[in-house]
């Protein structure tokens, strides 16, 4: 065992220096005894004194690696308003507990946000790891504002377009003008639907929900009845065994509603039909199948959604509904498959984990 120790230390040193995150090794030292006599006590939580720092610490915080040795970590990088928070982390380290938090720390570029992880090591020693996420958080905030403004303006402008197109259709006597206005209204309606789908996706992905058993039959029947009511010419049938529970949450309703809405809304048949059926594949898997008699989904779009194709400017799909379905089902640990049979229509199959309700 002893013969392998130098090799292990060399591996650790290589890892320590190679990490792109700022890392320091520290010892918790009682501040009063250290300041009066320079000695170090073995009792109390103490203050973290830097014993070692990697190159990334120098790059991130602007301190030379050699000059920080022996310096109080908190005084170097913790803003004054955050000292109490840092002391709580130190007490947890002194008790042998790990820390993980989103924190603000001082750098030579001002305050920045970090994912902080504190790892205790032996008695009164520990490691502090800082991952700078300031730019990522700022980019997310900017994108969020941009998306909200675009959706709001798009929705308002499309409402105007829809209203004007409808007015033209109702007032003009020229058939060519009516047909052009009808196309404008249809495209504006499609864009409105796309905007609504984007808003639904953001809400669904932002909400945190725990996985639990969900009974399929009452949920499918409820969604099918609602969609059937909204589309007068639609015919929706269900075939779901009773007491069939899957690993999911409230977002499964969004999945079912999106699949049935797509099956009917984009269906060009005079009598649009959709069927929702479920069966047990085995003791742990339920297959949920939505079949329609619509025009089918282009193969290129199927490959993109299922992850087998690449998104390009000319090949990106026409809607967001199936993306939302895939992302939610993936979060359940399930899978999605799309098939366009030779005789037409679309078959969307979801495989979900089966659960027994308590």
Image (cartoon, rainbow, N blue to C red):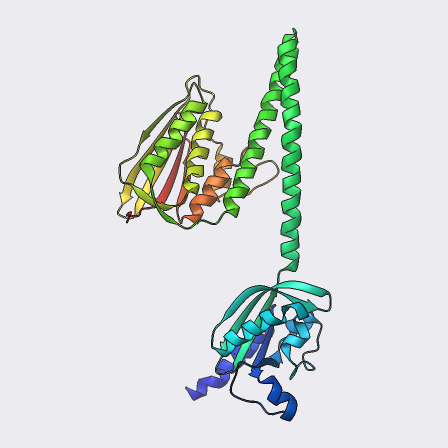
Report the residue that reaches farthest toward the right.
109
Q: How many marks?
A: 0
In this rendering, position of residue 177 left or right of residue 214: right
Query: Residue 243, percent across and down?
Result: 27, 40
Quick check: 38 above or below 123? Answer: below
Q: Nearer the viewer, residue 142 or 96?
A: 96
Task: Tell me if 264 is positioned left or right of 40 in this view.
Answer: left
Which residue is rendered at x = 47% and y = 21% of the image? 268
Residue 158 lies in quadrant: top right
**Which residue is at 69% across, 64% downward?**
111
Q: In which quarter of the image is residue 29?
A: bottom right
Q: Is residue 324 above or below residue 135?
A: above
310 and 174: which one is in front? 174
Q: Position of residue 279 (x, y in %)?
A: 29, 38
Tell me residue 94's x, y (percent).
51, 79
Residue 98, x across and y down, in percent: 49, 71
* Foreground of the two, 25 or 33: 33
Q: Which residue is drawn at 37% across and 32% down?
A: 222
In the displayed structure, does residue 139 sit left or right of residue 1?
right
């Amino acid at each position: 065992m002893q013969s392998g120790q130098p090799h292990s230390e060399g591996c650790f040193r290589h890892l320590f220096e190679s990490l792109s995150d700022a890392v320091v090794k520290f010892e918790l030292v009682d501040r009063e005894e250290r300041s009066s006599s320079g000695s170090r006590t073995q009792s109390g939580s103490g203050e973290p004194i830097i014993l070692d720092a990697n190159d990334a610490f120098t790059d991130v915080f602007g301190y030379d690696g050699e000059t920080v040795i022996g310096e109080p970590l908190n005084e170097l990088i913790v803003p004054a308003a955050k000292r109490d928070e840092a002391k709580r982390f130190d007490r947890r380290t002194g008790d042998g507990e790990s820390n993980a938090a989103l924190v603000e720390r001082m750098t030579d570029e001002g305050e920045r946000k970090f994912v902080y992880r504190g790892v205790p090591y032996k008695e009164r020693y520990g490691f502090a790891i800082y991952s700078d996420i300031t730019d990522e958080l700022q980019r997310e905030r900017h994108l969020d504002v941009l998306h909200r403004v675009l959706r709001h303006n798009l929705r308002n402008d499309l409402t105007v377009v829809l209203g004007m197109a409808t007015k033209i259709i109702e007032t003009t006597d020229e058939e060519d003008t009516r047909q052009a206005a009808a196309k404008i209204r249809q495209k504006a309606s499609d864009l409105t639907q796309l905007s609504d789908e984007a808003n639904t996706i953001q809400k669904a992905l932002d909400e945190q929900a725990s996985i639990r058993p969900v009974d399929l039959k009452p949920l499918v029947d409820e969604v099918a009845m609602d969609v059937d009511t909204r589309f007068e010419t639609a015919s929706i049938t269900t075939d779901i065994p009773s007491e069939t529970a899957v690993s999911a949450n409230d977002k499964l309703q969004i999945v079912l509603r999106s699949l049935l809405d797509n099956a009917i809304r984009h269906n060009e048949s005079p009598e649009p039909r959709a069927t929702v059926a479920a069966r047990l594949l085995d003791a742990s898997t339920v297959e949920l199948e939505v079949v329609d008699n619509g025009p089918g989904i282009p193969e290129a779009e199927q490959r993109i959604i299922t992850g087998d194709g690449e998104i390009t400017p000319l090949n990106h799909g026409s809607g967001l509904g199936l993306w939302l379905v895939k992302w939610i089902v993936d979060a359940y640990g399930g899978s999605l498959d799309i098939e366009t049979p030779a005789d037409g229509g679309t078959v969307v199959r979801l495989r979900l984990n089966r659960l027994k309700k308590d």
